[in-house]
Image (cartoon, rainbow, N blue to C red):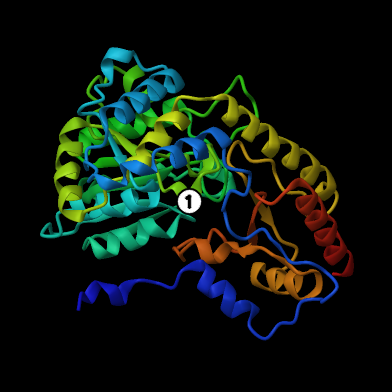
Amino acid sequence: MNKDLSRLQRYPFEKLAELKQGLQAPAGLDHIALSIGEPRHPAPHFVVESLISHLHQLSTYPSTRGYDTLREAIAAWLSRRFAIPRGQLDAGCNVLPVSGTREALFAIAQCLIDRSAANPLLLMPNPFYQIYEGAALLAGARPHYLDCREENDFLPDLDSVSAAEWDDCQMIYICNPGNPTGAVMSRDYLQRLIELAHRHDFVIASDECYSEIYFDESCPPEGLLGAAAAMGNDDFSHCLAFHSLSKRSSLPGLRSGFVAGDAALLAQFLLYRTYHGCALPPATQTASVAAWSDEAHVIENRRLYREKFEQVLQLLSATLAPQKPQAGFYLWAQTPLADTEFARRLYAEQNVTVLPGRYLARETAAGNPGENRVRMALVAPLDECIDAAHRINSLIATL
């Protein structure tokens, strides 16, 4: 048995289930789940139609590298979205389709970490997507947590890392926009990190799966590859960006995404994935081409989230008073009592489930940066989100 399996911590939702154990929610109130970041907007009809109409392709084995048409569609989207000169992105060597960002973010550490090093460090934000930690542990690396606190605009504090720790760092996960904070990294921040990666020779794995959920159509979040291109890093050296159709296109069940960037790293990742055996099914690839080639459904997706945030934030302004995130679909709200107790009472008294922030973070010298916060995913339909806000206010009125 792989001994590193014993180092894995329970997933946040297992802890949440234990927290709710023995509680009886009010029978007269329908349950509203704000705990899981699972998009619930309807899947784009034209993508579903494409998937169905190409199911006959199931009689052929797919290529791990992916169809040329898919890689070209992805490269074209990246160029448009992040203002990257079209000739700078080679669809043949700078793009690799993957089975959603979760699978690829885990696998990249297994591919790139050298566990024979004296002190292989893998840096990550704190709080974080738990796949980062699990990937580090199973790759034989030591997780190093960078607190994301309000005083640092909820961004990982790069100044807290010593030169020796940067030297030991083999890879850093970043999440931009952040989960659960919704914080967005500026171009200057990203370029500083790229400079550090070149100076200390580590890889940046940028999880950008929330990049298309933002509120100002004139100000989309920056991306790692766009920042690299703008500073003259023409071959995207040390840079890998991970994107998915799950949030952008409300297609979590399609399990389709990509990783793009440094061609030398992707060549090794392709070799790894050839043995890993996780090529996208042919019909999935064809449907993905349709999704990456259309922006109208993404704009409509953002409009739906914008409407929910406007109304929920207004309803909670005098009680929980959460800050509006810069992007993403989470509210990262402070609680008037311990986050676990707030979550317990909200479920027991109002049948609303939220995720305690401490479950998404780890204890550091400064404490747990998720403590006394909850993550609320505004993924449910508008009427449910409004109902949940009213119920939260009802609970707070009793405190």
Name the amino acid, label 1: Gly
In the image, taking residue 253 as reference, residue 318 lies left or right, namely right
| Foreground residue among 337 and 294 | 294
Q: Is residue 112 visible?
A: no
Q: Nearer the viewer, residue 6 or 335?
A: 6
Q: Position of residue 257 (x, y in %)?
A: 38, 41
Decide: is 36 above or below 323.
below
Instruction: Work out whether 160 lies above or below 223.
Output: below
Q: Quadrant of the N terminus?
A: bottom left
Determine whether 214 is above or below 368 in the image.
above
Callout 1: few (<14), some (14-19), or many (20+) C-alpha neighbours within 10 Å? few
Left or right, residue 320 beside residue 142: right
Q: Which residue is mark 1?
A: 253
- In the rendered view, would you say 241 is above or below 150? above
Residue at (58% x, 76% y) in the render? 17
Residue 241 position, x and y percent, is 35, 36
The quarter of the displayed image where residue 238 is located: top left
Considering depth in this image, is 266 or 196 the residue closer to the camera?
A: 266
Q: Is residue 147 visible?
A: yes
Specify the quadrant of the image occupied by residue 27.
bottom right
Image quarter in which the C terminus is found: bottom right
- Label 1's element? helix
- Please tell me which residue lies in front, 94 or 249: 249
In this rendering, the count of numbered labels is 1
Q: Quadrant of residue 218?
A: top right
What residue occupies the far left of the structure in this picture?
116
Q: Farthest bottom residue? A: 22
Q: Residue at x 53, y 69 (%)?
A: 13
Q: Residue 216's x, y, as percent? A: 64, 26
Taking the spot 55% from the left edge, 50% from the top edge, the residue there is 149
